[in-house]
């Protein structure tokens, strides 16, 4: 079994309820077990600023799915929640990002591991540090070491 970390985010409809429902969907993934979930966090949008605030969280999974199969499963969950990929960084019903998969470094056309911007985003780092404070990001170091660099990004734990 491998250890994977997933970031969750939503800002359309009832985003807190959506993220909680997405935790339930993750708990039902095939060949996987949901190990931990973070608190919910309210965050300002990144990129396209003229949109509602986000609710973000993180989850740790134990899985025997390959990284690509896990990504496909995450996309399937997004689709079930009505996700339409219309514009980059735009509003969404649900966003699930595969952040880390064991200590794997991978660069494929549709999947890069570790996630290339995870160390730059408060909405990823704070929930991730909550559920895995001792985690090392391959090629970047401890997750907690990156928190001061993103402390000004506007995040509040709910």
Image: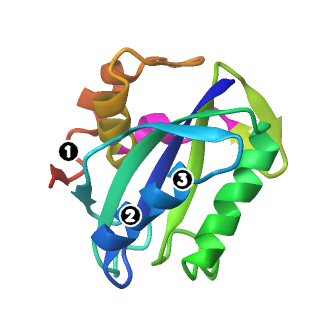
Report how far apart the C-alphas of labels 2 and 1 lie in the structure: 24 Å
Give the image location of residue 17, x and y in percent: 32, 71
**Quadrant, the C terminus:** bottom left
Label 1: few (<14), some (14–19) or many (≥20) C-alpha neighbours in 10 Å: few
Residue 10 in sight: no
Residue at image position (32%, 67%) is 54
> Closer to the camera, 81 or 1?
1
Using the image, determine if residue 69 lies above or below residue 150: below
- The residue drawn where x is 71% and y is 23% is 104
Tell me the tag on residue 26.
3
Would residue 36 be found to the left or right of residue 2 on screen? left
Q: Considering the numbered disc 2 on the image, is that residue within a helix, a strand or a loop?
A: helix
59 drawn magenta: no
Label 3 crowd bin: few (<14), some (14–19), many (20+), radius 10 Å: many
Q: Where is mark 1, residue-wise? A: 152
Looking at the picture, how far across and down is residue 129, in whole percent?
33, 29
Magenta region: which residues?
113-121
Location of residue 10 by image quarter:
bottom left
Residue 137 seen: yes
């Amino acid at each position: 079994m491998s250890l994977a970390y997933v970031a969750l985010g939503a800002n359309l409809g009832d985003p807190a309820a959506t993220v909680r429902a997405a935790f339930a969907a993750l708990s039902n993934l095939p060949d996987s077990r949901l190990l931990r979930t973070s608190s919910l966090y309210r965050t300002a949008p990144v990129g396209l600023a003229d949109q509602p605030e986000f609710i973000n969280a993180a989850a740790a999974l134990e899985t025997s799915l390959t990284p690509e199969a896990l990504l496909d499963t995450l996309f399937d969950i997004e689709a079930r929640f009505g996700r339409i990929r219309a514009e980059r960084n735009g509003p969404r019903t649900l966003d699930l990002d595969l952040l880390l998969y064991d200590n794997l470094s991978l660069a494929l056309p549709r999947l890069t591991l570790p996630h290339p911007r995870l160390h730059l985003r408060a909405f990823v780092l704070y929930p991730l540090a909550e559920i895995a404070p001792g985690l090392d990001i391959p090629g970047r170091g401890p997750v907690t070491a990156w928190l001061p660099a993103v402390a000004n990004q506007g995040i509040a734990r709910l």
